[in-house]
Amino acid sequence: MLAMVMIIAVQAQEKRVPEQRKVYRDKMMTEKIKLSDEQKQKAKALNEDYRKKMDELRKKDDILVRDWRNQMTELNKKHKEDMSALLSKEQKEQIEKYKVERKKMAEIDANARMEKMKLRLDLNNDQVEKIKKQQSEMREKRKTIQENRSQDMMKKREEMKVLIQKNKENMRSILNEEQMKKMQEMRKSMPRKRRVLS
């Protein structure tokens, strides 16, 4: 399943620099799950077939949203199964190991960001705990919104905007005025990243 996610992540990079996409894909497949040449060819064929079917589905304008979503879900499910069937037991184990490593790295990164924030904003321990709790609750709510298949993208975006606004208001209740100013200055100096709802 992770291989599928990784390959889709590579496909998502197609809209970025093609050389970067190819380097990332080749490195990923050879270093992490060590796909054979035969597996690479089969994966390429499966991905091309999947993209073709998704393009055909996107072009359908005489279909209900619910039916379109169901067909898309089925296509995704089949593609994941087909991609998983390409992998050996060892490769699947390697993917699971990689998932655990990535989760640990994400936790380390989150803790490091919190420590930097604590230092830069001169937060006390009570503030740190409140921010951690708020971030955890926000992650759960964001996940719930993203996984809600009964809502369309516009409704999800609206809910995300409300969630972000509540998060800002909560931060104002946790930080003092000077800390808020520092945080806003820090945000201005950081490059902006946008995430797409899925």
Image (cartoon, grey):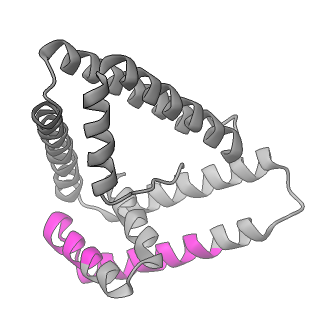
Vertical side of 110 occupied by 122: above or below: above
Q: Residue furthest right?
A: 62
Magenta stretch? 24-52
Q: Position of residue 166 (x, y in %)?
A: 50, 25
Q: Residue at x 56, y 70 (%)?
A: 50
Relative to the observer, which residue lies in front, 183 or 68? 183
Vertical side of 16 occupied by 130: above or below: above
Q: Residue furthest bottom?
A: 19
Q: Position of residue 132 (x, y in %)?
A: 26, 23
In the drawing, does residue 126 fall left or right of residue 133? left
Which corner quadrant of the image does residue 168 belong to? top left
Vertical side of 87 occupied by 144: above or below: above
Relative to the observer, which residue lies in front, 188 or 28? 188
In the drawing, does residue 67 fall left or right of residue 162? right
Q: Position of residue 86 (x, y in %)?
A: 34, 65
Q: Residue furthest top?
A: 126
Q: Residue at x 38, y 58 (%)?
A: 192
Is residue 127 located in the magenta-colored stretch of the structure? no
In the drawing, does residue 167 fall left or right of residue 74? left
Q: Residue at x 18, y 50 (%)?
A: 93
Q: Position of residue 189 (x, y in %)?
A: 28, 56
Dominant secondary-structure state across the stretch colored magenta: helix
